[in-house]
Image (cartoon, rainbow, N blue to C red):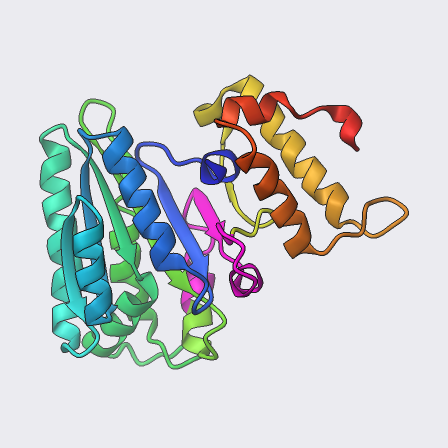
Amino acid sequence: RMLNLIAPIGHGQRGLIVSPPKAGKTTVLKQIANAISTNYPKVHLMVALIGERPEEVTDMDRSVEAEVIASTFDEPVTAHVRTAEMALARAKRLVECGRDVVILMDSITRLSRAYNLMVTPSGRTLSGGIDPAALYPPKRFYGAARNIEEGGSLTIIATCLVDTGSRMDDVVYEEFKGTGNMELHLSRRLQERRIFPAFDIDRSSTRREELLLGPDITERVWLIRRMFSHMITPPPNGAGMDITNATEAIIQRISRTENNQEFLETLTDEEF
């Protein structure tokens, strides 16, 4: 419900889940997968796990009703690349047949690392030791997401690691930061306080969200953002709340209602 408000997802979306380690990105992916399979049973759901832990692969396979294509971290880089390219090729063929396909990928960072070891060196090296030529294949994968006018659609939601201590991971995030039309940022501070979902409301958004939500709901969502901004702004112009406390307050308010429509109807401009 919270994702539908702050970063809605539509057919053909190209989304990026930006997450530090241990911020709950795998849990978010599972929740998105289960929501899609429950509410949109005709959508073909695929989960591509690149360089993941074996127990996470097993858990994902048992937790979601989706086609899971995976390579574990102990496999060679050729297996990681083959897994991603096989998933994309299958998704493209389904879209050509008029199907709506969703790929949930974890993660674009590990795929970029794999291509960095695979590609022929270009003679140039970016900060962090990554070859510029290694970034093109992951961009081709990520850029395949689109809504076909007279066919199906391909939606790709990929995770991207940040704050890992690796300069290479930061470079990968910088390269992909402006390429998506939806970004969901996870907060480790919220996760450490066991506040779920651990979404960074201020930094998460969808481009052209009014096309997905409609004008009335969009106005209400902007009201949520103004309310959140007021809560975290220092006095005298705001309430001066900590970001974690402000997020928790909004989550609690959402949980007191049965659905998002009911929650949005409780919001008024007089609150701030």
- Seen as rendered, the residue at the extreme front is 256
Residue at the image point whose x is 10% and y is 46% from the top: 90
Residue 173 lies within the magenta run: yes
Residue at the image point whose x is 22% and y is 56% from the top: 60
Residue 234 vertical placement versus 117 (above, below): above
Quadrant of the frame with the C terminus: top right
**Residue 120 visible here:** no
**Residue 146 visible here:** yes
Q: Nearer the viewer, residue 6 or 77?
A: 6
Residue 74: give x, y in percent of width and height. Answer: 17, 79
Q: Quadrant of residue 71?
A: bottom left
Residue 231 vertical placement versus 111 (above, below): above
Residue 248 lies within the magenta run: no
Q: Quadrant of residue 230?
A: top right
Q: Which residues are magenta?
A: 172-198
- Seen as rendered, the residue at the extreme right is 236
Counting labels gives 0
Residue 61: give x, y in percent of width and height. Answer: 17, 55
Q: Nearer the viewer, residue 107 or 113?
A: 107
Residue at the image point whose x is 43% and y is 80% from the top: 128
Residue 236: give x, y in percent of width and height. Answer: 90, 47
